[in-house]
Each structure stands twice: as C-alpha cells, then as structure tokens.
Amino acid sequence: MKVSNGSCIRRLSIRALLANRTRNVVAVLAIALTAMLFTSLFTIAMSINEGIQQNNFRQAGGCSHGSFKYLTEEECEELQGDPLIQAYGIRRFLGMPEEVPFNKSHVEIGYSDANEARWGYCTPIEGRLPQEGTNEAATDTHVLELLGVEPEIGAEFTVTFDVDGHETTQSFTLCGWWEYDGAVVANHILVPESRVDAVLAEVGVTPPGSDGMTGSWNLDVMLKHGARSIASDLEQILANHGYQSEVAGENYISIGVNWGYTGAQLSDKLDPTVAGIIAGVLALILLTGYLIIYNVFQISVAGDIRFYGLLKTIGTTPRQLRRIIRTQALLLSLVGIPMGLLLGWLLGGVLTPVITARLDGVTTVVSVSPLLFGGAAIFALVTVLISCRRPGRLAGKVSPVEAVRYTEGKAQKQKEKRNGKGVSLLSMAWANLGRSRGKTFLTVLSLTLAVVLLTFTVTFTGGFDMDKYVSNFTASDFILADAGQFQTGGEVFNDEMGVPEEVIEAVEAQGGITDSGRVYGKTTPAEEFVTEEYYRSVWSRWNTPEQLDSAIAFIERTEEGLLADGVQLYGMEPFALDHLTVLEGDLSKLNDPEGNCIAAVYSTDDYDDPMMDSHWARLGDTVTIRYVEEYEYYNPTTGEIYGARENVPESAAYAERAVKYRDVDYTVAALVAVPSALSYRYYGRDEFVMGAETFIRDTGTDSVMYYAFDTTKETNAAMEAFLRDYTENVNPQFDYESKATYAGEFESIKNMFLLLGSALSFIVGLVGILNFFNAILTGITARRRELAVLQSIGMTTRQLQTMLALEGLLYTLGSALLALALILVTAPVVGPGLNGMFWFFTYHFTIWPIAVVLPLFAFLGIAIPVATCRATQRYSVVERLRVE
C-alpha cells in the first residue's frame, strides 16, 4: 500500500538538520568552499579566455568569425546573401607606406564599411568614417602622430605609399580618428571605396593586381551558428554557391578562420593528449570538491547512525532514509552554494587582474557570464548529490540492532590479537585511525592533493627554461638591423637595408661590448641545382600540382636535368656562427676561406627538433652555387629571345636563364639550425651559411643584415637606453631587439602560472585542512563517552591530548608519504609529457615543497586535536559518561 509521507520525510529532515547546528555550519562551509573553488576557477579561466580572445582579435585584425578572401565584386555580392551568414563586412586593400616614418609600423590603406570598421576596432571616437565621393580619410592617433598631424577634423595630410609595386602620393582630409591600440598589429587609414577605385585607375592596377590581392573584395562574416564550427560553415557557404577552398581552380575561393576564437582553436587541437589533460583537470577539481563534502556527510551519518537505526525500527525504509539525507544536502546547498558563488567570483575577480597583469598577451576582463555562475552552481550541486549517495546507502543498510550498538569502526569485524608488548599512546593513536580506514584514507588524500598540486606547480614553473624561451626570439643581448627586417611581412632583404659601418661604430663607441659579430645577407641573385622530385616536395606545401607543372616549365635546367632554384645565403662572423645549433659536422671549417666550406641550414619544429627532410644537402656533399650577374629573358613556348627584362612584351609569357655567371663548388662541412632571430625571417628557399670572408669574396656584397653583440651586465641598461634613443630619434631607419625585453616577458608568463597554481593549491589546501578539522572534530565528538572512560580509569588529560595529537601527526605524515609516492610514480610520465607540451620547458624532479609544507601540517596535526580536546573538557567525566 502506497502512503503519502513526503511531508513527514521533509519535516524529519529539517528537524534532524536543526538538531545539530555545529555540523550544519561545517557542512555549509564545505559546500560553500566547494562552490567557491569551482566559481573562482571558472571566473579566472573564463576571464583569461575572454581577455586572450580580445587580444587575439586585435592581433588577428578583427573579431569576425571568418572571411572569404580576394573575391571579385560579383563573387562578393553572391556570397553575402547566404542564409548561414548573420552579418557581413567588406574591406578592400589598397596599399602600404613603407618609408620613414612608417618603417617601424604596419599601416594599411584601404576601404572598410561600417561593420568591418567596428569589427576591426576602427570605429572613430571623434568624427565619422569617410563619405563616398570625397578625399576624406579616418585613422588612429598613432598614424597621426607619425605624420605630425594634430587630431582635428578637417586637418590635411599626405601619404606616400606602394600600390602593387607602384608608388603614389595622395592627400587626404581627416574626417575621424580613434585611439591607438598597442595590441592591434596593423594600423589603418580608411578611405572611401570611390577613392580606392580612383587610385587604382591612376596607377594602372586592375584588381586583384599582380600580387593577387590589391583592390580585391574581402568578405568578413559573422555566422548564425557562432564560433562552434567556423571552418565547416565557411565551407558550406562556398558549396551552396558552387565554390570550394581545397584546390586552386576556376571555382576556388580562399577562406580564413579567425584563430582568435579559443573555441575554434580548441576544436582544431583537440587531440587525445589535450582531451586527457582537460579531463584530468576536471577530474581533479571534482575530486577535490567530492572529498570535502563526502567526508562531511559520511561523518555526519556515522554520528547519527543510532538515530537512523531508531527510524528503521518504526518502519522507515532505506529509500526514505536516503531521501532524508538528500533533502538535508539540498537544504544545506541552498545556503552554501550562493555563498560560495559570491565568494568565488570575488576571489576570481581579485586574482584575474593580478594574473593578467603578468601576461602581456591578455586584456584584463573579469567575466560576468551567466555560464560562469550556472556552470559553477551545477558542478557544486552535482558534487553534493554524488557525495551524499554513499553515506545514504550506509544509513539504509545498517540494521536497527547494529545502529544502536554502533561506534566508529565497530561495524567492521576484525580479529583481535593480543600483543605482549603492551599498549602505548602511539599504538592507541594508530589503532584509532584504523577503526575507520575509509575516513582516514579520504582525509589523508584530501591533504595529499594540496601537497601534490603545490609540488606540481613548483615543478611546472621551475621547469620554464628562460634560455630556451629567449633563444627562440633573440640570439644575443642585442641585435641591430634595418627596421624593415623586424617587420611582419616586411621587405625582402636588399642592399638598401644594410647596416652601415658608421652605425656599428656609433654603437661600439658606447663601450661595454664583450663580443660581437656581423651577419651578412645576400643582395644579388644566386642559384642552386636540385632534382625535380625535391623541388616538388618543397614547393608543394604552397602550390597545387598544376601550379608546380606550370612553374617547372619556366625553370632553367642543366644538362643533367637539374632545376635551377633560388637560394638564400648567409655570411657570418665567428660570434654569429657560435649561436648556430650544429646538428652534424664541424662549423669551425667555415672560418677558413681557403677551405671553401659551407653549412646547410635545416628547419626545426617548435621543440627545436631538426626536420631532416627540410634540406637535401648532407655532410660531405658538394654544393654548386651559381652567382648570376646577368639574366636573359625568352619565350619558353616559341623560343623567342627578348634579352633584358624591359624588352619583354607586356602580355607575353617569359622565362629567365643565366647568361653571365660564376659557378662555385663548396663542401658541406656542417648541418646547422639558424635561430630565428638571425634568420632572414621569411622561408621557402634552401639556405646555406658561409664564413664572412668567403661570403664577401664570392657574392661580391658586404651588406650587414644584422649586427649582434653581447654586453657586460653593468653596461646592459645603458646600452638599452642608447639604442632606444638612437633608433627613435637619431637614426629611425634602424631598430633593435634585446634579450632583456624577452626575459621580462618570460618572467611574466612564469609568474602568471605560479600565481594561478598557488591560488589553486591554496584553495585545495583549504579543502584538505577543513576535511582534517572536520575529521578530528567529529571523531572526538563521536568518541566522547569512550574518551571519558579512558580518563575514568586513569588516563590523564595530558596523555589524552598527546594521543589525539599523535593521531593528527599520523594523518599529516600519511599525507606526506602518499604525496611523495604519487610524485615518484607519476614523474616518469609527467616529465616527458611536460617537455613535449612546452618547447621552452626543461623538467626537473622536485620534492622540496613537501618538506616545506610538512611542518605546517604537523603544526595543524597537533593544534587542531589539542584545541578540540580542550573544548570537550568543559564537561566533567561523569557528564560525558552519561552520553549515549
């Protein structure tokens, strides 16, 4: 017969809850702390994610989901009406100024509509966007500062810039401006679309120009599905209109996915390793919350087991007992979860700015997303419900007779052994821990998690290798070069970009230089000879088979069938050679110009591992370099010879072949990797390194691409100040990179991870300490009568406190030993895993955090039991003996 007793069960739950207020306080604190843990972590994670995205958008050039590139006007109009597109913006690139004062800034001139300007952070704060049919322009305060123009509506300014290889000078009237944002990679001068068409007509360029992009239409879009599936949505839009982005052809359209959306990045990189790391972190967070709440309810049920036994004697079913415990958990959650959400958001709000301040690539944003609070609340509630399941089953399984006789640990049937050695306080403490092994293990585990997490944080941040990090960006204390050499997408190195000797002398006159060297760059044509198979393997990364067939048909061949391909050459003085990574061979042979030795340059991956398929030359091979002094141009189809380049008809197909040249043979003495800081900073062609004397002798050029040098620690700051002033005010054509800049960036990243890991360790440590406090408190409370019996037969208060303190010390010693065991077991996996995950990481086995934390835990292990014991001494032995 089914009886409606829901209200009775609820009343029992509430009254049982109100009967033990001390336990309720501990339970609410446990739930609140768990909710605070989730909320603070989610706040920090989502805030950093939003900050990273904002910076990513600025570096990517905008916040649109994706783009269709280099369209015709008809293609642009056709695609913008697709139903998958929520909103669109149009932009057209016109040109870029490259001479002073723009040689250190990436400035693009072109047209953007209102949507495009807003998505690209180019919305004027004063004035407006330019109107069609005018000579108006809008730009940012940085461009105006470079031009020396005050930001006033109506101000006139003139810019000289390159339009697909044609230089032009244009005047504009300022109609609006916005504040310069240092995180944005490109600055913009926005002009009307009508002005773009007029300038293109003036210089004789028809979109998309010879570069394939000038004047063409670019369609940036916001998708109705959001950032969940950007790439597939863009592909679907193309398919809807009969286009594709895979193979170059008549129906080919290039697409771009905004890498700034971290969700899009994660979906691209979600391999088993990344998925395992995410799952591991979530499991750790859930386990941390579970431990504290489970312990609270487990100990609570053990304390009230007699009460549940009496309820069973009057007919309460196990299912109803579980409902009582679940109802109590939900009521406690109503108080604890909101409290934890508020405290966690406040804690996350305090930590987020501190963390992001240490990371240059993150904008400070404190997230208030509803997902944050909803996710944290659900995580906390699920953790509470999971944590009270097993205690509920324990209450439902115990029989009324067992419940009445129950004391902690007595439910387990154990064979008693007599020990002739007698009983000591230590043996009694050890026996007490064994009475409820499950509770003991969980308490020890919760303390262990904090120690392991702190040790992992210290190991992680301690493994950040500054030398690896800095060497990826710069090779020496300072590197001086033409400003264009440091620009993203800058010019190909030429003789006008060389660093003259008078500039080097001005630097050396400052003193303090301990060692230095020049890196010479090639400014005249040079070729190598490679097989067609190798040529295809290299250039197939950027070209289709059809495009390669077309290119090869125009390339000069030797009698042996080898193709003449362009090559990049370095000339390096000994100081620069010392910064190369030698993979095989002897680099010192390059310093002897009579030896005619050369080093083949191999590419490396993000972890500095050489990619041995990135070059054809091997140690001991003979390499022939052809230095071309004059080319002849001809029609490869008809054989007609045009002679010089200016004689080639405008629409004629042509190829080139060397008619005046020198072939020089070299022996490959070494295989090397060149640090990116000393490289050309653009890739594609094979590269070789020569000694400085050999390079100047054979190429006939002495243009210095980089001047690299080290200084003493005492003069480092003075040299930094000199170079800053020299490259900004005295000779702005040049710029420099310094190791100090990247060292500061490295420390910011390291400190950010250290702070984040320490905050997480602190929160987990609080969980462990509260678990420990709760275990000691409820253990002593549940054994009040037993402890009173011990005192009644002669145990002194001091001995009682000593026994309880020993119990606490055994807890802390157990947590330290378990932490050490976990670290030793996981080290063989964690070390290689971290080394493989971060290219600037070097794993070092670390256990000293255990030694640091152990005294703190020992103090708590003594202080908490002694303080709890003293609290129970307020009642006399007789009063405690009367407790049932």
Image: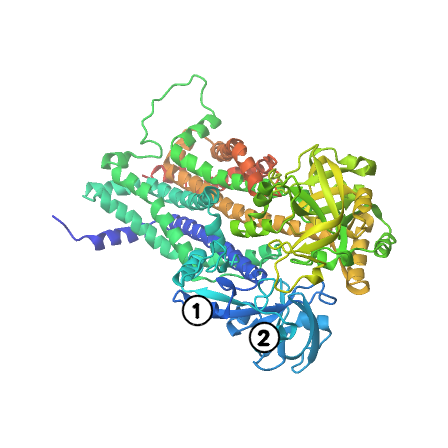
Residue 171, above or below 212 = below
Left of 718 or right of it: where is 258?
left
| Residue at the extreme left of the image, as rendered | 1
Task: Please state which of residues 30 and 532 is positioned toward the viewer in this rendering.
Answer: 532
Counting residues from the start of the chain, the first of labels 2 and 1 encountered is 1
Helix, strand or loop at mark 1: helix
Inspect this view and state whether residue 182 appears.
yes
The three-letter code of the residue at mark 1 reads: Glu
Q: Give x and y (percent) for residue 292.
A: 42, 44
Residue 391: quarter of image: top left
Residue 277, above or below 494 = above
Task: Please state which of residues 90 and 75 is positioned toward the viewer in this rendering.
Answer: 75
Distance Cα–Cα, label 2 vs label 1: 21 Å
- Residue for point 33% across, 31% down: 410
The three-letter code of the residue at mark 2 reads: Asp
- Residue 197, disc: 2
Q: Give x and y (percent) for residue 494.
A: 74, 56
Helix, strand or loop at mark 2: helix
Inspect this view and state whether residue 856 appears.
no
- Residue for point 49% across, 59% down: 255
| Residue at the extreme top of the image, as rendered | 420
> Residue tagged by mark 1?
78
How would you rate the neighbour count of disc 2 (Cα within 10 Å): few for under 14, some for 14-19, many for 20 or more?
some
Name the quadrant of the C terminus. top left
Task: Please state which of residues 65 and 793 is positioned toward the viewer in this rendering.
Answer: 65
Q: Give x and y (percent) for residue 664.
A: 76, 41
Q: Give x and y (percent) for residue 185.
A: 62, 62
